[in-house]
Image (cartoon, rainbow, N blue to C red):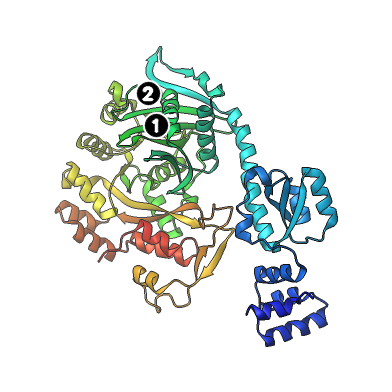
């Protein structure tokens, strides 16, 4: 005689006698099944109930983790609509037998249809409905992606770009190798198409002692996507070098190149960097979407107060606005959004960039080309004769560029630029360190803003949680500081690739050049004095901005600790 569900759960210690009694009473009143009653009361979890049912019914049980091990080839046997309708998913094939996880192993009609569909003997395994639903969501996403990827690859066109110009036109030569059937060509095409689909900004191809690792930078964080045999490395590198017109034979020196990908949906500029390492050449590809610029100041993540201050300064007739932060912190995006807001038919707006990341209609954008002598400084000298009203300088890298930018801002022009610095006050000291005299820096600067990007909590799997004591200590917060506040995190799901995050938003440290701050700059004050005065005048630090995002349920303490530094 087979044991009943309640007896099995009692023996396994999953429920108590009291809980079983309550569930039986509820079952009698509501005419539910015992398992449904236990789940409804919260006395058992779904996997424990169905594991016990498998023993009661004499049907093999399959756990959620085992279902997720199914390969794409096996999952592809059963169409997704059929799997969803019948609450089942194929897991493995052994000796012409198809193992299937089902919520109802007694569904003879579904099993018979599955036998006709696959031409295999069907072996039904019981699984929790939630585990089957989760597996369908995750595994069929991979199947759909693989099919769509094939279509995408067929639509991709690769162009090598040349820096030589003839009769004012860029020489664009289509690389026919993109249409070949060589496996390495397909592999590289697949990597790039997958990176575009996953919103990656960088592709890192790293050779190790025994294999090649491919990682994508998604939402600012590297994620390992695949590993291939080391034997594939020379072919991958050669293919990328061909696309970017680099020297295939040169493996001892770093090389830089670029190429463009055109698909029916978008145009992507790919910057290539090849670096020799002890195990072989490491390749990094930076993907720049050349399509329409979709951001505006309202979508960057500034709160209403910061947005009001920023808008006031970008509408001034002259002066300099500098945005600082490390590479990939969204500086260029913020400047583009500012130009997009203030552009008008009355102004001549010119940018000098390396590279031009987005094409902005109504704005004259200049791409620097150091190989032929078109540097920031040389381009700026020519722009003086173009009668600009507003100017964007991609980055202040040296004293000569800084000197021209300062003179522009002091002669009736509004200048936007970026600088690599850790925060707003260190941006001023960095500008002085480059060689700008204190009296000029104090006169020309209107606004200095430092920024970072933090990942947003995934909206599909967002849940409240209680931070650990260690997290509170790292954040330097007490229980009183967070009283009445709720913390959130992402549990991890297929939508966010099980990271708990999807997309990014900005945090900002905004320093207005008010008179007390200007006087300190004139007096060549140190960074500590500048920060103290700015804080008294109401400047909120990057940490303060990150905390506000945490309390608003937008990001997590982990992200705050990842991108900001606590001052001691």
Tell me what residue is drawn at x 48 percent, y 77 percent. Answer: 484
Label 1 neighbourhood size at 10 Å, few (<14), some (14-19), many (20+)?
many
Q: Which mark is residue 246?
A: 2
- Residue 14, given in percent of the width and then of the height, sits at 63, 78
Residue position for label 1: 272
In the rendered structure, the answer to whether residue 506 lies left or right of residue 412 reads right
Relative to 184, residue 172 above or below: above
Q: CA distance from mark 1 to mark 2?
A: 9 Å
Look at the numbered disc 2 and give the secondary structure of its residue: loop
Closer to us: 199 or 175? 175
Q: State left or right for residue 410 relative to residue 78.
A: left
**Among all residues in the image, which is located at the extreme right?**
109
**What x and y, as percent, mark residue 474?**
35, 68
SS class, disc 1: strand
Q: Residue furthest top?
A: 167
> From the viewer's perspective, is residue 341 above or below residue 362?
below
């Amino acid at each position: 005689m087979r044991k009943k569900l309640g007896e099995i759960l009692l023996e396994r210690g999953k429920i108590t006698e009291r809980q079983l009694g309550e569930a039986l009473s509820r079952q009698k009143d509501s005419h539910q099944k015992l398992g449904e009653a236990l789940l409804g009361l919260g006395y058992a979890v779904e996997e424990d109930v169905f594991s016990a049912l498998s023993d009661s019914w004499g049907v093999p049980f399959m756990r959620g983790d085992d279902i997720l091990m199914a390969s794409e080839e096996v999952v592809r046997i059963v169409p997704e609509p059929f799997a969803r309708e019948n609450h089942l998913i194929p897991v493995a094939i052994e000796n012409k037998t198809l193992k299937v996880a089902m919520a109802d192993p007694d569904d003879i009609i579904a099993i018979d249809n599955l036998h006709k569909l696959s031409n295999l003997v069907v072996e039904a395994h019981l699984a929790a409905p939630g585990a089957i639903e989760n597996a369908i969501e995750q595994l069929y996403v991979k199947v759909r992606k693989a099919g769509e990827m094939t279509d995408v690859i067929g639509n991709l066109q690769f162009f090598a770009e040349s820096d030589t110009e003839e009769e004012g036109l860029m020489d664009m030569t289509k690389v026919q190798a993109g249409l070949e059937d060589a496996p390495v060509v397909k592999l590289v095409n697949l990597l790039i198409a997958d990176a575009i689909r996953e919103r990656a900004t960088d592709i890192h191809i790293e050779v190790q002692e025994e294999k090649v690792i491919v990682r994508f930078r998604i939402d600012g964080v590297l994620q390992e996507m695949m590993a291939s045999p080391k034997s594939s490395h020379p072919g991958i590198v050669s293919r990328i070098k061909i696309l970017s017109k680099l020297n295939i034979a040169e493996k001892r020196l770093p090389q830089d190149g670029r190429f463009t990908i055109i698909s029916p949906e978008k145009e992507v500029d790919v910057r290539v960097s090849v670096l020799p390492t002890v195990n072989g050449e490491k390749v990094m590809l930076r993907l720049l979407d050349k399509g329409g610029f979709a951001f505006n100041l309202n979508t960057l993540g500034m709160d209403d107060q910061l947005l009001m201050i920023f808008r006031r300064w970008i509408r001034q007739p002259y002066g300099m606005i500098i945005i600082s932060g490390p590479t990939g912190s969204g500086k260029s995006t913020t400047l583009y959004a500012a130009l997009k807001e203030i552009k008008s038919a009355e102004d001549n707006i010119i940018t000098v960039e390396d590279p031009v990341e987005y094409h902005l209609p109504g704005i004259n954008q200049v791409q620097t080309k150091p190989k032929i002598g078109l540097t920031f400084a040389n381009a700026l000298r020519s722009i003086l004769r173009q009668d600009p009203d507003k100017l964007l300088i991609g980055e202040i890298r040296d004293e000569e560029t800084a000197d021209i930018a300062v003179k522009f801002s002091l002669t009736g022009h509004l200048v936007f630029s970026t600088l690599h610095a850790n925060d707003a006050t260190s941006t001023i000291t960095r500008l002085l360190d480059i060689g700008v005299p204190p009296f000029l820096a104090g006169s020309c600067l209107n606004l200095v803003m430092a920024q970072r990007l933090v990942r947003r909590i995934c909206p599909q799997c967002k849940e409240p949680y209680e931070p650990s004591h260690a997290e509170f200590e790292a954040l330097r917060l007490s229980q009183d500081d967070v009283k009445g506040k709720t913390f959130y995190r992402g549990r991890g799901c297929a939508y966010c690739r099980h990271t708990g995050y999807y997309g990014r938003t900005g945090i900002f440290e905004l320093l207005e050049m008010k008179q007390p701050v200007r006087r300190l700059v004139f007096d060549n004050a140190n960074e500590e004095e500048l920060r103290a005065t700015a804080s008294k005048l109401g400047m909120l630090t990057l940490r303060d901005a990150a905390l506000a995002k945490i309390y608003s349920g937008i990001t997590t303490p982990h992200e705050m600790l990842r991108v900001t530094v606590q001052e001691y």
